[in-house]
């Protein structure tokens, strides 16, 4: 009886360990283009806290992501590169014109509960989750403030893009300590580099 119990326990452990290994060794995704979506813009300022305006931070980080991806030899497409308002449907339309592409939308967070801090990564599809896990790991290991994890969400830009897609909330500017970090260009560069590192970690070789 005890032997059977030990065997059953070992079998359960094997399933757990095997599942974890499968998550780490996710199947690579082939892509040659990254569509970079700087959240908000124009009349839509996004969150405004501690003298920081989300739309400005989003565009700054997006441009840093673009530069890092180009230096890695990847093609990039920006849904906006100036302080302009772009409808969510148009952002998805821009992305869907691209082939062999992935989509990353960049945002900053805000909450009346000002003690909350940390980045968050959102996904909707299975392949999107693969990227969310990789980007989350990268930010957690490389950027001060860490992350709060990955989350499933039905955001329009995730729902209407026909490719692996993630939305990265780079931190809570409503938190005074985190807002000071986000105001620092060197921190925003660390965020950009971490996002790029996460994307490249999942990229397969042709």
Image (spheres, helix red, strand yellow):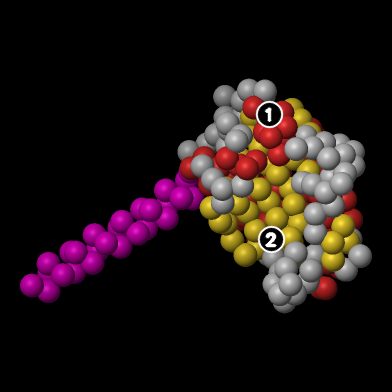
Q: Look at the image and say whether residue 15 sits in the magenta stretch.
A: yes
48 relative position to 146: left or right: right
Residue identified by numbered label 1: 93
Q: Is mark 2 on a helix, strand or loop?
A: strand
Residue occupying the point 47% across, 46% down: 25
Residue 61 drawn above or below residue 53: above
Measuring 42% from the left and 52% from the top, which residue is drawn there? 21
Q: Name the residue rendered at 35%, 59% in the picture.
A: 16
Q: Check the picture and name the quadrant holding the N terminus.
A: bottom left
Nearer the observer, 69 or 6? 69
Q: Earlier in the sequence, mark 2 or mark 1?
A: 1
Crowd around label 2: few <14 · some 14–19 · many ≥20 (10 Å): many
- Where residue 110 appears, x then y in whole percent? 75, 64
Residue 35 visible here: no
Packing grade of label 1 (10 A; few <14, some 14-19, many >=20) is some
Q: Please tell me which residue lies in front, 97 or 139.
A: 97
- Residue 183's disc number: none
Q: Over which residues does the magenta segment extend?
A: 1-26
Please say whether residue 42 is visible from this viewpoint: yes
Point out which mark residue 119 bears.
2
Q: Where is residue 36 in the image (x, y as percent from the top left)?
A: 74, 38
Which residue is more in the foreground, 148 or 51?
51
């Amino acid at each position: 009886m005890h032997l059977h119990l030990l065997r059953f326990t070992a079998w359960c452990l094997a399933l757990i360990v095997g599942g974890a290994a499968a998550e780490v060794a996710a199947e690579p995704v082939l892509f040659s283009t990254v569509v970079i979506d700087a959240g908000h813009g124009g009349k839509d300022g996004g969150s405004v806290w501690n003298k920081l305006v989300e739309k400005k931070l989003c565009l700054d980080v997006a441009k840093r992501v673009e530069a890092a991806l180009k230096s890695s030899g990847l093609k990039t497409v920006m849904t906006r590169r100036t302080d302009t308002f772009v409808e969510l449907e148009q952002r998805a339309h821009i992305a869907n014109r691209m082939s062999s592409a992935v989509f990353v939308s960049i945002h900053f967070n805000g909450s009346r509960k000002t003690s909350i801090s940390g980045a968050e990564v959102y996904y909707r599809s299975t392949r999107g989750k693969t990227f969310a896990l990789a980007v989350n790991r990268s930010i957690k290991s490389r950027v001060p403030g860490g992350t709060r994890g990955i989350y499933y969400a039905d955001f329009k830009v995730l729902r209407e893009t026909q490719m692996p897609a993630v939305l990265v909330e780079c931190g809570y500017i409503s938190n005074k300590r985190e807002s000071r970090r986000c105001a620092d260009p060197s921190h925003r560069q660390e965020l950009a580099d971490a996002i790029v590192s996460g994307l490249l970690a999942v990229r397969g070789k042709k």
